[in-house]
Amino acid sequence: AAIEKGNFDHFMLKEIHEQPQTIQDSLRGRLNAEQGTITLSGLEKIQDKLREANRIVIVACGTSWHAGLIGEYLIEELCRLNVEVEYASEYRYRNPIVSPKDVILAISQSGETADTLVALENAKKQGATIFGIVNVVGSSIARLADAGAYTHAGPEIGVASTKAFTAQLAVLQLIALKLAEIRGTISNELFQTLLRELDDVPAKVEWVLKNQVENIKAIARGYKDAANFLYLGRGYNFPIALEGALKLKEITYIHAEGYPAAEMKHGPIALVDESLPVVFVATKDVYHEKIVSNIQEINARKGKVVAVVSEGDDAINDMAEAVMVVPACHEIVAPLVAVIPLQLLAYYIGVERGLDVDKPRNLAKSVTVE
Ligand code: G6P
């Protein structure tokens, strides 16, 4: 059957709203929070390789590369294993050092991105083991991989990736947790806590979609004419700042840059004045005090602070011109929830500007040529 938009104006909006379900679909049959177990048959298939791996190399493009950055933080923290994240187009051409002890995580919604596919073919020839995190079943990358885990987000029609991204994050969470269990690098207590946190994510995403849409629409109206945006975050939320900026660029054609919040002092802060909206991804985590002081620095220069905050975080509420609220959650799963308001913000600014958000100019859903 043809895929329909249903009651939604655009596929992008429909796909944003599908996320409680699609995240659930990514976790189904894999995460069992009650029994406290994760089953990931693809990963178990390459257990021995993973036990002996020197490092993991994540290869991807675009939004999938942002998911990869979060994967790096997760796997390093939980599995104490070296991880590198590579743009497929760079990895492919720069004669990288590949060993048979490398495990490559390939992340791709379509499974057809040319640069990713060729980068993997090259690495495979040099003996690396390829693990695919792919949405489209039976796609070229899925077939090339030695093992893998499908993301199960269903067909994504909107050119700007939304539900495929959160599905990638959900699968990366499962991989990091399972691998930590296999490698014995996680306490049972933390393992169980994170399983429950992950299990709660779909309901928290649902909460954002129920309670924040009107607020975000109003914020979009207020900022739709800005010429530039800066997005800042730290830790697990730094890649979310990159992804928020990418969504805005893709859908609204407004120039946006994502940066690690502390790094703003080394350049972007020069741009800050009363005309620059600065979006902070500032959910409660170990960096909270630091990000609060970054917000103060922007305020002191009259930048307009918009922040994604955890429910009940009054400190930032008082410092920001506008806030988008998400339910409190463990910092490790926070990106899955924190990205939702940024997807909605880009969407509604695009709509306010009268643009065709499902088919942004010059972009392709899948880049199958170089
Ligand atoms: C294109 C799409 C992006 C996507 C990227 C990587 O640029 O517009 O949404 O993130 O390709 O695609 P892949 O299918 O490999 O995830």
Image (cartoon, rainbow, N blue to C red):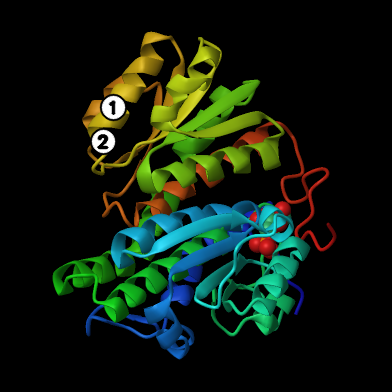
**Res. 31 image quadrant:** bottom left
Q: Is residue 288 above or below residue 137?
A: above
Query: In x, y percent, where is residue 333?
Result: 34, 58
Q: Secondary structure at mark 2?
A: helix
* Residue 137 visible in the displayed image: no
Residue located at (78% from left, 50% from top)? 359
Answer few, some or many: residues within 10 Å of disc 1's Cα (few below 14, many 20 plus, some between 14 and 19). some
Q: State whether label 1 is within 8 Å of ligand 1.
A: no
Instruction: Locate the C terminus and report the quarter of the image it occupies.
Output: bottom right
Q: Secondary structure at mark 1?
A: helix
The image shows a total of numbered marks equal to: 2
Return the x and y of residue 293 as percentages of the image width and height.
29, 23
Residue 97 at x, y percent in the picture: 60, 63
Q: Amino acid at mark 2?
A: His
The residue under label 1 is which amino acid type?
A: Val
Which x, y percent locates residue 107?
59, 66
As rendered, which of 221 and 160 lies closer to the eye? 160
Image quarter where ligand 1 lies: bottom right
Quick one: 340 or 249, which is closer to the camera? Answer: 249
Pointer 2: what residue? 288
Left or right position of 186 against 140: left
Q: 193 left or right of 38?
A: left
> Looking at the image, which residue sits at the far left?
189
Of residues 29 and 141, the one nearer the viewer is 141
Residue at mark 1:
292
Residue at 45% in and 67% down: 55
